[in-house]
Image (tube, coloured by chain):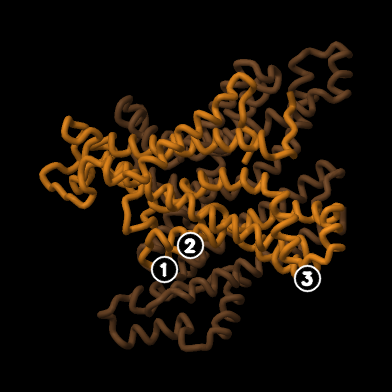
Chain colours: A brown, B orange
Amino acid sequence: MGPFLLRRFLSSLLVIFGVVTLVFFVIRAVPGDPVASILGEQALEVDKQAFRDCLHLDDSLFTQYKLFWSDVGNGTLGELCDDRGVTVKDKLVANLPSTAELALASLLVAMLIAFPLGILASLRPYSWIDNSSAVIALLGISIPNFWLGPMLLILFSITLQALPNPGGGVTGLSALVLPAITLGSGLAAKLARMTRSSMLEVLNLDYVRTAKAKGLSRFVVVMKHAFRNAMVPVVTVLGLQFGAILTGAIIVEKIFARPGLGTLLLDGIEQRNYMIVQGAVIFIALSYVIVNFITDVVYSLVDPRIRFD
Amino acid sequence: MINASPGKRLRGLPIFGAVLLGCVLFIAIFADLLAPFSITQIDVARQLEGPTSLHWLGTDENGKDVLSLLLHGARVACLVGLSTVAFCSILGTTIGCISGYFGGWVDEVIMRATETLMAFPGILLAILVIFVTQQPSILAVIGALSITGWAGYARLVRAQVLAEREREYVEAAKSLGFGNARIMYREIIPNILGPVIVQATFGVAGAILAEASLSFLGLGPQDAPSWGALLDQGASYFLLTPHLAIFPGLAIMFTVLGINFLGDGLRDWLDPRQIRSN
């Protein structure tokens, strides 16, 4: 296990280096004067110069690159020069809980839909249950979340008046239900099919037959013996889908007017504040890399036969 | 993509998907003739109207005819979907083939590059690129989606080439004295095209969804009517006029559904790695 994890770790480090470098240079390719675009054309010359100094715009690109690495290294991701003393990290930290709440809730929704559906489909392959779960899965993949969200709003907030309108100042569980369903549905579709095929493989194995032959109840055989082992490959899918949840959250936050990392990123783009855009993109990409690494570690611990070469 | 293909009784779905896509393509090509109104025609007296006998699907915030916008939106979707995938698959296949065929440090560099690009989930890198280009046009959107898109094809093709380059026919081609380029393009690539075509089919759906997502976020092409941009309006005015959100979403959904049906059929037909469990 050692050499594999070490290789995996080193390649993750390389990817992190690549991500930071790529974002840094892509952002520096933005045409026009960043000072004018953030402060406005009419800003005082003194302010503009202070801003340039703060962003180190008069230094060479290589010096800026080195300074940027120290900002990444100390975790601040740089100071917001139009708002002295506030770092990008502060903005990220302020917006993270809302996105994390949404991501966890949508994960929960996805698992609540996918596991029963996938298990039922695997118990009777090619039956009507299996076929309809396949159709539901295809719909789940094909319905874009930026359509499902408004549709749910029209149905539940307007027609049924059951849930609060977005941006109405309502927080708490009732404001989380629709965003979580919107974000979780696509994941649920993929998870359900993955659960089905993984269960189908496990259900034909000898130890499951042994468990049945022992006279254990069908429920115990399916849930305790088969499902727990079928979960192993499904966990990797969850790791890979973490990225889809993060980018999906950008869209869902916009639909439901929720604060969060996506809203921070979109506001940053609108205000052309490239420190925020840069910081948010790096943060999202790096957390994706780290989650994938952790997934691989967990996977190889749970199933030592797995090698990723 | 995951295996979402249903059982034996639903085998007609790929044909249904192909027919659906044929309709979308037809609409895209003849949008000018089919659209009842001009998409530049602004009618301030009829903003955000519901469906009427004049405007079958209602009007948008500028009083433009939604049906006409939708028909022209098919053109944007097809253009972005097809050209992004064409660009990505050709570039990705070439790079992946080079990577797998030559191996060594070339392979190492290319693989690390693809890993870096794939570290940006979904449309994140495209968002960044659009931010840099400032005035997103159709070309900018295609470019932004292509920059990340080729990496997936490169990795797929590389894995195939690694297995393929040890086979006898490649050895035979080498002993006949063929050059590397000829072996790659005339011998290896034709033999591994099946999985690439399957991935490209699903890729069209991915690109259409990505374009719509970008447009929904206000980062899509500003020079053409996109389904995503209409949905963006629909989501802002959903309290006033639900119809504005419903129809572009249905258009996206049926197009993507059609591609997924077709892709599943193609996979069963072309991808020998897929062994059915029945």
- Vertical comparison of A268 with B45: above or below: below
In the visual, does B32 lie left or right of B188?
A: left
Which label number is shown at residue B133?
1
Sooner in the amino-acid sequence: mark 1 or mark 2: 1
Q: Camera-side residue: A167 or B129?
A: B129
Which label number is shown at residue B175?
none
Residue bearing the label numbered 2: B143
At 47% across and 65% down in the image, what residue appears? B129
Q: Chain of mark 1?
A: B
Distance from label 1 to label 2 (Cα)?
10 Å
- Residue A57, horizontal then vertical, whole percent: 46, 84
Distance from label 1 to label 3 (Cα)?
33 Å
* Residue type (three-letter) at the residue carrying disc 2: Gly
Residue bearing the label numbered 3: B105
Q: Would you say the residues marked 1 and 2 are in contact, meaning their CB atoms lie under 8 Å apart?
A: yes
Numbered disc 1: secondary structure: helix
Q: Chain of mark 3?
A: B
* Residue type (three-letter) at the residue carrying disc 3: Trp
Q: Residue furthest front?
A: B176
Q: Chain of mark 2?
A: B
